[in-house]
Amino acid sequence: YKSFILIILLATVGGVVSLVSLPVTILYVGIAVYILGFLLFDVFTSGDSYARVRGLRPAIGIMTGFLGGSVSMGGLPLATYLNALDLDKRVFATGLVLILLLHNGLRLFALSITDLFRASELVMGVGFFIPLALGVFGGIRIRAHISESRFQQLVRGTLFVSAIKLLLE
């Protein structure tokens, strides 16, 4: 998984650079179509077979980093991949949070050195980690009371709502 994380980090820098040249609408539609495709694939096959598609891990790493770096939407493709691995809810949530913390830290750094963030925006970005930490702590407490099947339904439902919202923007 080290190469997967490295790919995400490198693609994050590429996403930040592309932020100034690509229309956001194209990126939103692309993310939405990908998520809906994943959900359809998941309905008609086992999610585990999706995770075993050859070459998928690097592609998801690139998509996660690039979309996260450009429009801060890298968590959605990452969530589809981690969900397809059929991980225990604790492992899924911990992996998602750790990768996104690392990714967003790099994104803030890359945006600050490319002058796409002013100092005030950088402070706000760092301030984002406070509610994130509170959300993680709250999630850990709540997660213990949610069954695995309900957790999977919540993840898929959140992905579906996110895809529809992106298509409507």
Image: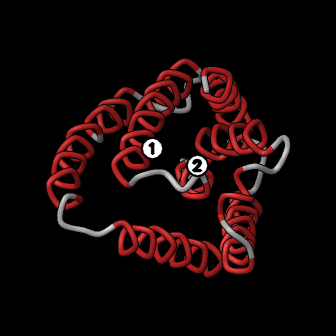
Indicate the position of residue 126 as horizontal and vertical percent values: 31, 31
First in sequence: mark 1 vs mark 2: 2
Q: What residue lies at 20% left-to-right and 50% top-to-bottom? A: 140
Out of 157 and 127, give the one closest to the viewer. Answer: 157
Residue type (three-letter) at the residue carrying disc 2: Leu
Badges 1 and 2: C-beta atoms under 8 Å apart? yes
Q: Relative to 112, is 4 on the left or the right?
A: right
Q: Residues within 10 Å of mark 2 (few under 14, many from 20)?
A: many
Image-quadrant location for residue 97: top left
For the C terminus, the quadrant is bottom right
**Pointer 1: what residue?**
96
Q: Quadrant of residue 120?
A: top left
Secondary structure, mark 1, is: helix
Q: Is residue 139 above or below residue 46?
A: above
Which residue shows up at 64% across the image and 37% down it? 65
Q: Position of residue 157 (x, y in %)?
A: 48, 77
In front: 19, or 56? 56
For disc 2, the marked residue is 78
